[in-house]
Image: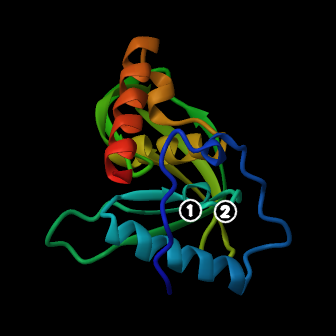
Amino acid sequence: MALRPILVAPDPVLKQKSKPVEGGVTDAHRALMDDMLETMYDAPGIGLAAIQVGEPLRIIVMDLAKEGEPPAPRYFVNPEITWASDELFSYEEGCLSVPDIYDDVERPARVKLRYLNYQGEQIEEEAEGLYAVCIQHEMDHLEGVLFIDHLSRLKREKALSKLKKARKEAAL
């Protein structure tokens, strides 16, 4: 396992649409997921999409275990949302690719999803609460969408300006 650099907005790679994993889950995909998980824990974060480490593949890792609980890593290959509730849920989101920016985003409160797990088995399940928020947030990454793209134009421009300023200061 290895730590990988996390891309930060406005890196244009983050706007790429990720490609489906073809031919099932391989050892190379599992090695990528292991690296992603280690990178996410180190950051620290609760979810990470492969595109955030420069790999345009439809792969996500997540761990929603609370502090003090044992790790509960989850792996999603080629995830798809097959149903979303009309009921909405607002949650203050943040993102490892948009550091130090947090804002409320409204998303469907519940979703049904289908994906391949770490072993390549197809899973279908329903998600709600933080799990639903997190999977939708990470799946947005697979489409080249950041959580700040859900904000008003003014809030999005303010967030990007703050990121650019921080990048300039870090370069000094």
Return the residue at label 2: 55
Picture residue at 78% right of the left edge, 54% below the top:
19
- Residue 136 is marked as none
The answer to whether residue 154 of the structure is visible from this angle is yes
Q: In this view, does 15 lie above or below 25?
A: above
Per the model, the C-alpha gap separating discs 2 and 1 is 6 Å
Dividing the picture into quadrants, the one containing residue 165 is top left
Front-lying residue, 150 or 14:
14
Name the residue nearer the viewer: 135 or 52: 52
Q: In this view, does 82 lie to the left or right of 169?
A: right
Q: Residue 53 carries which label?
A: 1
Residue at 33% from the left image edge and 42% from the top image edge? 166
What amino acid is found at the position of numbered circle 2 in the picture?
Glu
Q: Please, what secondary structure does the residue beneath circle 2 have?
A: loop
- Residue visible at 31% across and 45% down in the picture: 169
Marks 2 and 1 close (CB-CB < 8 Å): yes
What is the three-letter code of the residue carrying label 1?
Answer: Val
| Count of picture labels | 2
- State the residue lying farthest toward the left: 68
- Most foreground residue, 21 or 84: 21
Q: Position of residue 3 (x, y in %)?
A: 46, 77
Rendering coords of residue 101 (x, y %): 31, 36
Horizontal and vertical percent position of residue 136: 51, 41
